Image: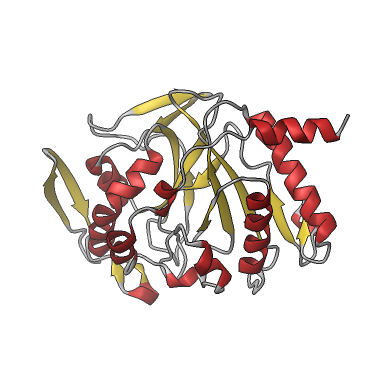
Amino acid sequence: MSRAVKGTIVVDGQELTVSNPDKVLWPEMGITKAVFLQRLAALSPWLIKHCRDRYLTTIRYPDGVTGKSFYQKNCPSPAPDFVPTETHAGVRYVVLQSLPVLLWLGNLACLEFHASFDRVSDPVRPTEWVLDIDPSLEEEPRIMEAAVLVGDLLQSLGIVSTPKTSGATGVQIVVPIIPDLTFDELRKIGEFVGSYLCDKHPRLFTIERLKKNRGDLIYIDYLQHYQGKTIIAPYSPRARARATVSTPLHWEEVRRNAAITDYHLLNIEDRLLAQGDLLDRVAPQSLRQILTFIRSTRR
């Protein structure tokens, strides 16, 4: 039986233990824990930005992506003093706001980082609106076509959005907003958009919640965007064979049928250094006029 290997590193003045740095986490990509921690450090300015002020849920894979996994909502114990937490609905969540915290989680084989839609500082009024374009099939060649149709409809309504891959099978449409609407009000807009697209493209879209009833249709999930629910954070890795990363895209890339597997842990840093965070390119906007229009059509 091999002995566990441990060492320590100092990051931003905090001492961290790194265990089993040679453990392979993504066999297909040859990514060990040591490489993973290096990639997390490179991604940290962007990943932390999108997790800060959120309740964090991670998915841990102690033996890598081919092994068993479990969700971690409560802060792992014991936790170092530098790990901030917030208790919400009886759960003591980690709040990811520094590189030492990120690397501590990475050493625990937290391979995915899911951030809450509601913020710690203001849980009532969100600062973005998200539509999750979720295929019913594991292999769905129409997913980018579907995302374009959603984006085009939003644009026709005067809504500027950014698409991002989930890193798994879907695409999420992100709309930065001025925090002047509630989650319930945004759901009304989502229901309007989803219903319209289902009527317009009945062989492509559905808003049926139960997967068993969707057939091969692509689900427009407007219900996920709500208090207490989470989304895979932008620039979070995914526990997929290719070590994919949830990546914001240009609409031109979506129109060219970009592959979700094109964006992964070994190349995402170069993209970010060259292009920056595409989510920063869209200014927060108000959707109140859209909500008013929808309400007027239902009188």
Percent position (x, y) of residue 178? 52, 31
Percent position (x, y) of residue 284? 49, 37
Quarter of the image where one finds residue 94: top left
The answer to whether residue 72 is seen in the rendering is no
Percent position (x, y) of residue 204? 77, 65
Relative height, residue 227 to residue 212 (above, below): above
Residue visible at 29% across and 34% down in the picture:
78
Percent position (x, y) of residue 169? 58, 64
**Which quadrant does the N terminus fall into?**
bottom left
Relative height, residue 104 to residue 53 (above, below): below
Task: Indicate left or right for 166 with 2 as reference.
Answer: right
The answer to whether residue 178 is seen in the rendering is yes
Quarter of the image where one finds residue 257: bottom right
Give the camera-side residue of 111 and 46: 46
Residue visible at 75% across and 42% down in the picture:
191
Task: Indicate left or right for 88 with 290 as reference.
Answer: left
Residue extending farthest to the right is 299
Relative height, residue 176 to residue 164 (above, below): above
